[in-house]
Each structure stands twice: as C-alpha cells, then as structure tokens.
C-alpha cells in the first residue's frame, strides 16, 4: 500500500506539471481530503488559479500568495520536498492516475464519515444529509466516460448491432420484444400507466415472472402491496392455480408445492427479490442503498421494478412544493439509477380522472396523473386498458405503445388474462397456452 504522505507529494508535483491532470483532480478533490496542511493549501491555490486564469501557476506564485511569513516558509519547505522526490511523472503516469483515484475514494469516504458524525452530534441531526454525503463519497471516481466516438467506435458499434451483442433485457413476451427490438437496454426508464385497478401491478408481476424463468435476476420494490401479497401473485402465475383457492384446498397445496419446487430446480433460473417500503415514504436514495447492499453480496439485478412511482417521495434536498415537479425529479433519478446499476428500471403510474373516461385509442402521455413530464422523460410508455373494438374475449388487456425509443409506436399489444391465476398471455402467439391452462386454473373463456 502506498504511503498517504508519499502519494500526496506525487499529486502536488504532478499538479504543477500536467494541466489535464490538474483539471481532473480539481474537479473531484476537496482541499480537506489532504492530510497535510501544506498540501491542502497548495491544492486550494492551484484550483483557484486554474479557475481564474485557465492555466497552471508557477510555484513562486503560490508561495508569494501566502501572507503569513511562517506559513509561507512552511509552504516553501514543503515544495522543496515535493521537487526532490525522485518520481518520473511521464513514465509513471498511469500508475499515478490509478493511485490518485484510490486515494480519492479513500479520502472522500473518510471525509463523508467525519462530516456525518458532526451532523449526527449537532442539533440539526439531519440524517438525510448525512446519507447523501456518504452516497456522493461512494460515487467519487476520477475515471471519466467520454461516451461514444462515432467514427473511431464505428466497427465495434456496428458489430454489436449486427451480432445483437448489446446487453438488452427482454420482456420475454414475443410480440413486445419485437416492438422494442429485442429488449430494454440498461440505461432506460420504462413506464406502464393505467387507471386505478387497471392491471399495472399484474403486468409487472407477469413480466418479472418470465424474466426470472429466463435466467435474469430481478428486484421488485413495492410501495403499496406487501412482500407476501406480491409473492402470492408469483405463486399463482408459476403454478397456474386459482389464487383464491391454492392455499386452502389440500390437493392444490400439494400441486402448488410441486410446481414451485420444479421452478426452483430449473438450472437457468434467475433470482427474485421483493422489497417493501412504506407507502409514500420511499425515496430513490433508499432504493440505491438497497441495490448497493445487493452488489456488496455480488448480486447484480438485471431488471429493477418499482411499484409505483406516484407513491414515492422526492429526496429532501430536491424537494419542491409541487407534486408534478417532485414526480418529474423522481422519474429522472430513477433513470439515472438505471445507468448506475446497469439495469433498466420499469415502473407504473396512474391515468388521471379525465383520461379514465376516454377510450384507450385517445389516451396519450398528457393523461398521466400528477405529472405530464413523466411520459416525456421515459424511454418507453405503454398505456394499459381495454379497446372494445379489438376485444373478442372478456379477459383481454390492451397496451397502447405511446412512446418507444427502441422501435415502433402507435400499435396495440394485446394480452389474454387468466382471471384465476392472474397469468397474462401474448394474444398473438400464446392463445393455445391460454386455453389449455384454463383446465388447471378453472378460469372461463367468455366471448364478448
């Protein structure tokens, strides 16, 4: 392990030598991160000079900017020690950047802990502020993603498209996957909206149930339904049994256990985590903390589901006095979360009172309750409802694709529903499964 005193001197030496390096560290470091008073003062002076003049200061400028003679002598002596280090910056630049990054992470975290202790011991005792300091410290990193270089990355980018090697999480519904070109990419926010009791949670359960079976690990955050109630939905979907009878009838109990054990024993199966938060109390920061706990255990979810966005609270530091602005911020924070944890975020929202009286074909993102911007910020928006003109059976659900950055828009995705097991089927290619499974669930197929 590199001694902190040595790496501090290397950082200061390089800061006078390379402008790019100086810009990099002055954007990420605080002067309080340094152990020594001299290194802290010098770093602060370099940062101020860069900001004011756009270039690196000479060491004499730093020394002569110190008014106190004793402090000036101390800075001068420290810089002599820095200059005397036998360290070739150009040859060891990669090593220096790596060690500087490690030093940044270590110091940022320690600084956040110390600040948090002060907050906890103060009269203010703002735990939310303390939590945010630690979260920001955990994100401290010198490594900058410069994005896509269109021409230099041309071969790699086209190869990924041609070979379909881009990481996408399929919905595992054939027709929907065709609509979204194979799946949802990691950096995306997907919203399904419906009226109250319109099947929002039902759709999320079915999507996630299929993804788990296909080998993806998912986490479901619930702000309305309990963890056990959501688990019961998965029980019925996987077993195809009547959700109202499967725990009461002795024969069904045995069938349920048998079916779930078969699902559990599948080699390709992913894992499912269900986490409940109090209604109206959960923040994006709470979700982030939970996901980090999973990552610390080497559990990295492929898909994140939030049921649902309207029941979340905006983080205190960003809170406004308007519900629509708060929801807009929550949506944007969830989308940022998808980038941070490399997994698409799927959530649901309400259709407002005006929209609940309109036919599905007339609904747009302007009818999302409390927040018009939510639909604008989402990468995909589907409105769940029923179109009488398309219906053949009573147990049908229709999803109008209102917004789709991954493919086509404007079409209706049609689903059949088993009202006993709560399982949803792709109408275009799973009709026979829907009919056959009714023999297990006892559901009726009523033609309109």
Image: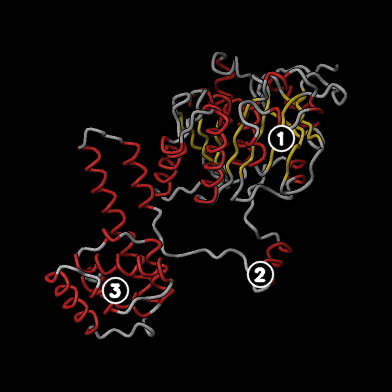
Give whichever of 261, 213 is nearer the camera.
213
Give whichever of 212, 226 is nearer the camera.
226
94, above or below 324, in the image:
below
**Residue 315, position in %: x, y?**
44, 36
Q: Which mark is residue 12?
A: 3
Category of crowding for the residue at label 1, using alpha-carbon neighbours closer than 10 angstroms: few (below 14), some (14–19), many (at least 20)? many
Callout in the foreground (2, 1): 1
Answer whether labels 3 and 1 touch (C-beta < 8 Å). no
Callout in the foreground (3, 1): 3
SS state under label 1: strand
Mark sitting earlier along the chain (3/1): 3
Category of crowding for the residue at label 3, using alpha-carbon neighbours closer than 10 angstroms: few (below 14), some (14–19), many (at least 20)? some
Name which residue lies at 61% across and 25% down: 236
134, above or below 62, in the image:
above
Question: Marks 3 and 2, Cα distance to the nearest angstrom?
Answer: 38 Å
Residue at mark 1: 382
**Residue 97, position in %: x, y?**
38, 72
Mark sitting earlier along the chain (3/2): 3
Q: Residue lying farthest front?
A: 67
Give whichever of 206, 33 is nearer the camera.
33
SS state under label 2: helix
Residue at mark 2: 156
């Amino acid at each position: 392990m590199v001694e902190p005193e040595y790496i501090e001197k290397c950082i200061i030496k390089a800061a006078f030598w390379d402008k790019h390096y100086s810009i990099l560290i002055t954007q990420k470091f605080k002067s309080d991160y340094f152990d020594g008073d001299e290194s802290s003062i010098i770093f602060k002076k370099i940062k101020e000079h860069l900001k004011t003049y756009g270039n690196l200061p000479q060491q004499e400028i730093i020394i002569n900017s110190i008014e106190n003679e004793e402090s000036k002598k101390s800075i001068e002596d420290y810089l002599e020690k820095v200059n005397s280090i036998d360290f070739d910056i150009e040859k060891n630049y990669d090593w220096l950047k790596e060690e500087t990054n490690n030093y940044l992470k270590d110091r940022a975290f320690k600084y956040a802990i110390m600040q948090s202790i002060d907050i906890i011991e103060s009269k203010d005792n703002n735990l939310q502020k303390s939590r945010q300091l630690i979260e920001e410290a955990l994100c401290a990193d010198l490594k900058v993603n410069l994005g896509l270089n269109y021409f230099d990355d041309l071969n790699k980018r086209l190869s990924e498209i041609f070979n379909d090697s881009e990481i996408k999480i399929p919905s595992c519904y054939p027709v929907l996957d065709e609509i979204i070109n194979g799946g949802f990419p990691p950096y995306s926010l997907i919203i399904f909206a419906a009226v109250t009791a319109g099947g929002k949670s039902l759709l999320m359960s079915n999507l996630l149930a299929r993804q788990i079976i296909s080998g993806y690990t998912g986490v479901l955050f619930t702000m309305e339904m309990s963890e056990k109630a959501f688990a019961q939905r998965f029980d019925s979907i996987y077993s195809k049994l009547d959700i109202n009878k499967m725990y009461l009838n002795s024969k069904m109990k045995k069938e349920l256990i048998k079916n779930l054990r078969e699902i559990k024993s599948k080699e390709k199966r992913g894992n499912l985590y269900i986490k409940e938060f109090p209604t109206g109390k959960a923040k994006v920061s709470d979700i982030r903390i939970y996901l980090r706990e999973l990552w610390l255990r080497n559990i990295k979810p492929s898909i994140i589901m939030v049921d649902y966005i309207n029941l979340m609270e905006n983080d205190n530091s960003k809170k406004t006095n308007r519900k629509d602005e708060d929801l807009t911020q929550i949506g944007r924070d969830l989308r940022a979360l998808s980038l941070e944890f490399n997994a698409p975020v799927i959530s649901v929202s309400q259709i407002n009172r005006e929209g609940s009286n309109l036919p599905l074909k007339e609904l747009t993102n302007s009818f999302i309750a409390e927040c018009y911007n939510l639909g604008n910020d989402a990468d995909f928006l589907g409105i769940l409802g029923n179109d009488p003109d398309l219906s053949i059976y009573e147990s049908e659900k229709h999803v109008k694709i209102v917004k789709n950055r991954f493919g086509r828009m404007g079409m209706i995705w049609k689903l059949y529903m088993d009202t006993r097991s709560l399982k949803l089927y792709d109408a275009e290619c799973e009709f026979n499964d829907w009919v056959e499974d009714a023999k297990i669930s006892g559901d009726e197929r009523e033609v309109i």
